[in-house]
Amino acid sequence: MALAPLVFLIIFRYGPMLGNIIAFRRFRPGGSIYGEEWVGLRYIETFVNDPTFWKVFANTAILGGLTLAVCFPLPIVLALMLNEIRRAKFKRVVQSITYLPHFLSVVIVAGMVIQLLSLPGTVNQIIQAAGGDAIPFLQRPEWFRAIYVGSEAWQTMGWGTILYLAALTSIDESLYEAAKIDGANRWQQTWHVTLPGIRPTMITLLILNIGGFLNVGFEKVLLLYNPLTYQTGDVISTYLYRVGLVSNNMSYAAAIGLFQAIIGLIMVMSANLASRRLVGTSLW
């Protein structure tokens, strides 16, 4: 049973790593997939000295940081709130409603956002009905980050809650009873029993999220942004798309992608080391 996923990983995950060699070789369409001639660190020096790349890198770091800061704690909060609900039917209804957006494709979510926030969209209709002026949300760069993070939180919050609810079921009920005997109220039980009980799950997901810190969703950004919002919306993945596929500069795009992967690896290892030393929980 493990053979099929192992073959999948080798073919589609480890095999493509060999293609990173074109970050150090000149690639020409129609030639060898591993490049035609060795150019050393030429492409790395190019993006290091490219101010556009560092602007895109800053946008990616800011958008990734905002997504992590907002989307990581929300499932924990929602799981704790659902855990306090005693009516099982109402709890199931709320949980179903919150995780259903996870099953919508990114294209559908982006289409809904565009329909809601366009000039003739629902949000502007409400603003105009209240006596205000329509706001071009999708054309203003200062709104892009809020739109992206808000849609990401709405789509992922409910699904992430399932993991924490599963972790909550593993907490020994005798711990809550002991806390009640000691005079702990609901807030104190949550702080001293519930949160420590789900801490391993929290740490594991946090490390995984930090690993994907720079891999801000390519599809959603590509569907939501436009040249007017490049100032805040252009990220490394969309920049790679334009440089590598649109401009056909594969070697330069591979060099940037390799740099992004190395930064992600360093962040995962650093987060894992810090977690093991400070909390005592880690992935390895």
Image (cartoon, rainbow, N blue to C red):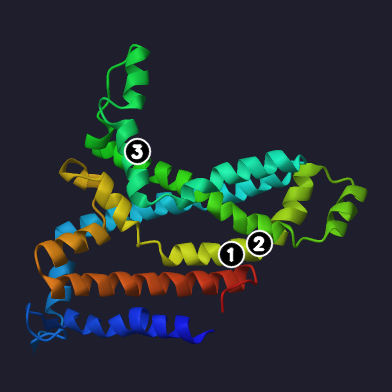
Judge from the rendering whether residue 245 lies leftward or rightward of residue 83; answer left or right. left
Residue 48, position in %: x, y?
A: 18, 68
Disc 2 to disc 3: CB gap under 8 Å? no
Give left or right: position of 78 versus 21: right
Q: Which mark is residue 67?
A: none
User: Real-space Cα distance between discs 1 and 3?
Assistant: 31 Å
**Residues under labels 2 and 3: Cα distance?**
34 Å
Kindly identify the amino acid type of the residue bearing the numbered disc 1: Ile
The numbered mark, 2 or 3, whose residue comes first in the sequence reads 3
Q: For mark 1, give the secondary structure.
A: helix
Please give the label number shown on residue 199.
Answer: 2
User: What residue do we see at 28% from left, 32% from top?
Assistant: 137
Q: Judge depth for marks 2 and 3 and give the one in front.
A: 3
What secondary structure is found at the residue carrying circle 2? Answer: helix
Q: Whole-percent x and y of residue 200?
A: 64, 66
Circle 3 residue: 113
Asked if labels 2 and 1 touch by Cβ distance under 8 angstroms, the answer is yes
Residue 52 occupies which quadrant of the picture? bottom left
Residue 248 locus on image (x, y percent): 9, 68
Residue 265 visible in this rendered orientation of the protein = yes
Circle 1 residue: 203
**Residue type at numbered disc 2:** Arg
Quarter location, residue 25: bottom left
Residue 230 in picture, x, y percent from top left: 20, 47
Three-letter amino acid code of the residue under disc 3: Val
Front-most of 6 and 193? 6
